[in-house]
Amino acid sequence: MILLGALALLAAVFAFVPLYIVLPMTAHSADLIDHVLSIRRIGTVACPLFAAAAVAWFSLKWRAWSRWRRIAGSGLLLVALAGAVLSRINVVEKMFPPADGATLASIAGFRDVADSDMVIGVTLGSETRAYPVRFLAHHHMWNDKLDGVPILPNY
Amino acid sequence: MNFLMYDEETGSWWQQISGECLFGPLKGKKLVRIPSDEVTLSTWRAEHPESTAVRFLAGIRYPESDWEKRISKLPAVADSKRRTDLPPRELVAGIEFNGASVAFPIETVRAAGPVNHAVGGEPVLVVAGADGNSVRSFFRRLGGNVLVFYKAPGAAEFALIDEATGSRWDFSGRSIDGPLAGRQLARIQNTKDFWFDWQRYNPQTAVYRVGR
């Protein structure tokens, strides 16, 4: 049971600690970001291993366990499995999905935002484009191409 | 402002404000910043009639026009090394040049009119547009001369004049009238940012104040 608990705890730590980088209103230092992303990278391999070990240990032991131990063991097993799944998902990408494929309008007839609203204007080579700040404030990043050059307007 | 960006191709993590890769296979690499303008739609439309604009996607609730007002009331990130020259959420136009950086409080630029200053030893002009929201910056060196700018007195429309020749200049940095008509000032990129964020990435930054 202690081994199962330790495996569940490890899987949870490796899976949940990386969520630190999406904590809002936090002063993230470069060092901490580095450590946390290292943990995340290790976790993608380690968490499934912890979960596999937990499954193996549980299936080996559960026949010998009392009813309450089985319930507690199942709970810990679920935590380990959840950690394994979470470690393989880029949660950040689910929260802020990447976006592209803009529909364009000519500036003369563009009425999606007010005249007094701000835009980010870019000129590259022969092409000029306006990205409304309200648009970028929602999407944060927009993968685009201007005059054949891949660019990333962001806000 | 300021977040981490993730690329699907290599799984590297990038910092928004610097474009620098902080973690992953591309660590240490830096994205090239392209010049951009943050101005009102009407200003951009008048200056760039050939421009395209990116349309809102259907089915998304975009922030309202006054969303920045709400943002400005949010608390700022706590930072023990924070400098207290300005309130944390004060908006600044930040300029980096020659290894030096100066934060120009946008409110001050608006109130004081065109700001003639220097960044990293190079004379610059920081000016708010007629719309009151757009801020642009230019090098003041033209040929061998350093120009000093004033708001054209009594002008109905936005116009600057330079002290030496009395030529008139528009918000795009082009002289529209006078001995220097047709000449164009070179742009220098300014970054609109909250003070708390700017000072974190430019810890040595100077802060522009009227009279200094």
Image: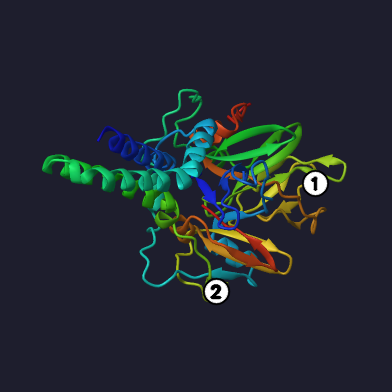
Q: Residues within 10 Å of mark 1 (few under 14, many from 20)?
A: few
Q: Nearer the viewer, residue A46 or B62?
A: A46
**Image location of residue A21, percent across then percent down:** 44, 41
Label 2 sits on a secondary structure element that is: strand
- Residue at 53% x, 54% y is B131
Q: Which dot marks residue A89?
A: none
Occupied quadrant, residue B164: top right
Q: Which residue is mark 1?
A: B165
- Work out whether B15 lies above or below B34: above
Camera-near label (2 vs 1) is 2
Q: Which mark is residue A104?
A: 2
Q: Is residue B133 above or below residue A111?
A: above
Q: Nearer the viewer, residue B176 or A11?
A: A11
Three-letter code for the amino acid on which mark 1 is drawn? Thr
Please say whether residue B110 is visible from this viewpoint. no
User: Label 1 is found on which chain of the structure?
Assistant: B
Which residue lies at the image location 72% right of the left edge and 32% below the top edge?
B99
Q: Are marks 2 and 1 on the same chain?
A: no
Q: Amino acid at mark 2?
A: Leu
Quadrant into which the C terminus of chain B falls: top right
Within the image, what quadrant is residue A18 found in?
A: top left
